[in-house]
Image (cartoon, rainbow, N blue to C red):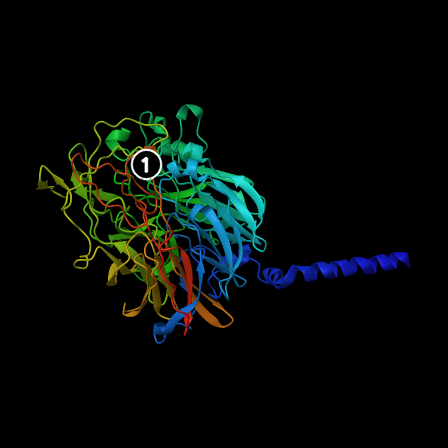
Amino acid sequence: MHAFKLKILSLSSVGFAFAALGHQALAQQLHPVTDAALRNAGTTGTEWLSYGLTPGETRYSPLNQINTSNVSKLGLAWSYDIHGGGGNQEATPLVSNGVIYSMTNWSVVYALDARTGREKWRWDPEVNQATVRPKLCCGVVSRGIALYEGKVIAPTLDGRLDAIDVETGKPVWETRVAYSQDNYTITMAPRIAKGKVIVGVSGGEFPVRGFFAAFDANTGRQVWKFYTIPGDPSKGFENEAMRKAAATWTGDYWKMGGGGGSVWDAISYDPNTNLVFVGTGNAGPWPESVRKQKGMDNLYAASVLAVNADTGILKWYFQMVPGDEWDFDSVQQLMLADITVKGRPRKVLMQANKNGFYYVIDRVTGKFISGQPFVEGTWAKGLDEVTGRPIVNPEAHYGNQPIPIAPGPGGAHNWSPMSFNPATGLVYIPASLTGAFTYRADDKFEYKPGKQNLGTVFAFGPNGPVTDGKPLPAPPTIGPKPLANERAALVAWDPATQTRKWIMPGGGSIGGGTVTTAGNLVFQVIPDGRLVAYSADKGEKLLDVQTGLRGGMGPPITWELDGKQYVTVAGGTGTVQFTPPGGAAPAPARGGDGIHVQAEAGAPPPPPPPGFGGGPSATPKMLTFVLDGKLPLPSPEPAK
């Protein structure tokens, strides 16, 4: 009898425990973010579970409630004051089980009720801003988080990786990826592959040896690590890939801090081949003469790497810019899709590279399929039709004489996300159309441990690059003609034929981004504060909303809840206090991996871009739109 009563009490306790979970916890159990859910992410479009929506980073939603016939009726459903500030809102929000999760400046994570915008919780990792700020190569920015089995996976600027409970906002585990004391930071969004968190490190032009690593998503334990640059040969090589890479470097390359090759953005995953694809940054310092690497390829900088998700073993690589000395990182979005090329179905990896070429590569073998310039450029004559290796203009290999090269370090396409619509077959690229930079090797370069080491001096004049008052000669130009009097545009590109289908002004390679839908729409966020919608097939402008969130705009997402489709954007920087490393005078910085450049003696420095250099800016906010939304847009009050 007593035993029976004890069982009854036990069952009753269990019942109370389940009741205490509450509605949202039960919802999490009904729709957990598992490997299967991530594999099928984007199938219905109701949720946005990972950075690029799909494992292939296509940013295509099958939702069509909002379409070309009614997109002009979009209005505000709710707004949320993100608080804080200090940099751009570059994160892509995620949506799961009626909750929006995102990250803002200084790696602060927040969760909102998707129906109302009400804050559920907020988690601050309390990054030591005073010590980390001088180590930032790219501003106080973070591009996002990941979701997995009841956890928000959040990287921090100071090199930590944290798992946070989706319901409570409390930490579950914490691990260390890298240390800011070693000049590493993390600005990218992590990706999930078979229960592993894949994340890379930023470092820009600091002395670092780039790498990316995999961590168990449930424990934080490191599973494997892959360096992108070979180390000191006398210490042995971590794997055969590093041994092979070392043959493409010469001299004591490792003595200048590691060689570069940071991984600050692009990672995608193909569950069918179990391959993780990673883009790598440039080698450092920039000029091959300063690196003492003249004529060397310098693997695996400025490359795309395909590694086995279980082991981290290299399957194949493709180097976009061998021996790069123009800062042409290959970390831009790596998009996976199935397209038909010359009548043959192909499983491809695609990238609109910073160097101005659009690449289509076989994602199974790594073999080059095609590549053409999507903007004007001068650094190369084209790509080899068989290998994809660039045919570099001899004049582009600069020395002590300055020469203007296009694209410049900001790139024709940087971190601003593009999207692919399978119905139109087009990729929508936020592109910078102009932006030549004048490169000159620093003949007085001295390596500085712990500081940025570009090895390059840029020359600026009031009307562009000059020397002795005369315009500098530039290599010949290739690529499609830009729009007249426009510096940036949205380019609709056909990857199957490598041709431009339409182009509309506004946007650029840095800031904002796109999402495309089955409603024959492309939504674009433009850093001047606008949310714009075009017809995906023809590029007809159908919506243009000025949000007031000038500067610091992040990419748009779309999702569905309670039978309604929504569009969410975030923007604003707050008050930015940015001091270049080493205490130098303020210098221009680019979103993405950031640079700090020294102007030619006597030449006026170029103005800093929006969001850098201090001063007032719009308070960071998240805005969510719905058909027939009635709320007024919040006033773009300056940050305090």
Q: Observer-nearest residue: 371 or 448?
A: 448
**Circle 1 SS class:** loop
Q: Observer-nearest residue: 448 or 483?
A: 448
Residue at 64% of width from left, 62% of height from top? 22
Look at the picture and state if 593 lies above or below 497: above
Q: Observer-nearest residue: 178 or 374?
A: 178
Q: Position of residue 217 (x, y in %)?
A: 55, 47
Look at the picture and state if 233 lies above or below 566: above
Quadrant of the drawing holding the N terminus: bottom right
Query: Residue placed farthest to the top in the image?
Result: 234
Query: Residue placed farthest to the front in the image?
Result: 640
Q: Position of residue 536 (x, y in %)?
A: 32, 67
Query: Residue placed farthest to the right in the image?
Result: 1
Q: Position of residue 227 (x, y in %)?
A: 42, 36
Q: Could you tell me if residue 450 is visible in this image?
A: yes
Residue 590 in which image quadrant: top left
Look at the picture and state if 230 lies above or below 57: above
Query: Residue placed farthest to the bottom in the image?
Result: 69
Residue at 42% of width from left, 37% of height from top? 130
Residue at 16% of width from left, 59% of height from top? 484
Q: Could you tell me if residue 536 is visible in this image?
A: no
Q: Position of residue 444 (x, y in %)?
A: 22, 27
Q: Observer-nearest residue: 552 or 325?
A: 552
Q: Which residue is mark 1?
A: 283
Instruction: Say which amino acid is labelled 1.
Output: Ala
Residue 9 in which image quadrant: bottom right
- Judge left or right: residue 480 versus residue 33: left
Q: Residues within 10 Å of mark 1 (few under 14, many from 20)?
A: many
Total numbered circles: 1
- Judge left or right: residue 133 versus residue 296: right
